[in-house]
Image (cartoon, rainbow, N blue to C red):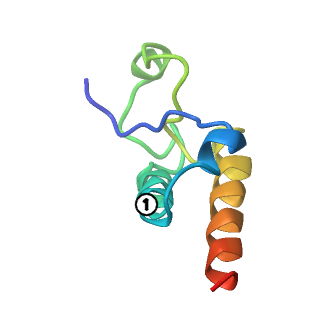
Amino acid sequence: MTRHRVRPVPTTELEALTPARLKNYRKALLALEESPALSDLSADDVARLEPGFIYFKSDPGWGPLHVAVVGLLQRRNGAR
């Protein structure tokens, strides 16, 4: 079973990414499904997802990570 997933990246690592890589990371975050309940996965499928990754926007780590990426992009765009 292959699902879209994103590896959480600490803010210190995000700061080292180029604007293009940050934009791609944001696109990957936005491409995730909303929640397990709205996906086509069964509860057993969800239980078998590899830990350490974000698979859904409903994951508690998704929001803060997305905010950090958007904030970095805005600061860099404002620095021009």
What residue is drawn where x is 72% and y is 38%?
60
Element on which disc 1 rests: helix
What residue did someone put label 1 on? 27
Q: Position of residue 46 (x, y in %)?
A: 46, 23
Question: Depth check: 37 or 22 in front?
Answer: 22
Q: Position of residue 26 (x, y in %)?
A: 50, 59
If the image is split into quadrants, where does the C terminus sit?
Answer: bottom right
Question: Depth check: 17 or 59 in front?
Answer: 17
Compared to 45, does 65 lie above or below? below
Q: Amino acid at mark 1?
A: Lys
If the image is split into quadrants, where does the N terminus sit?
Answer: top left
Q: Position of residue 28 (x, y in %)?
A: 42, 52
What residue is drawn where x is 43% and y is 60%?
27
Furthest toward the left, the residue is 1
Tell me where residue 76 sits by quadrant: bottom right
Question: Depth check: 65 or 37 in front?
Answer: 65
What residue is drawn where x is 26% and y is 29%?
2
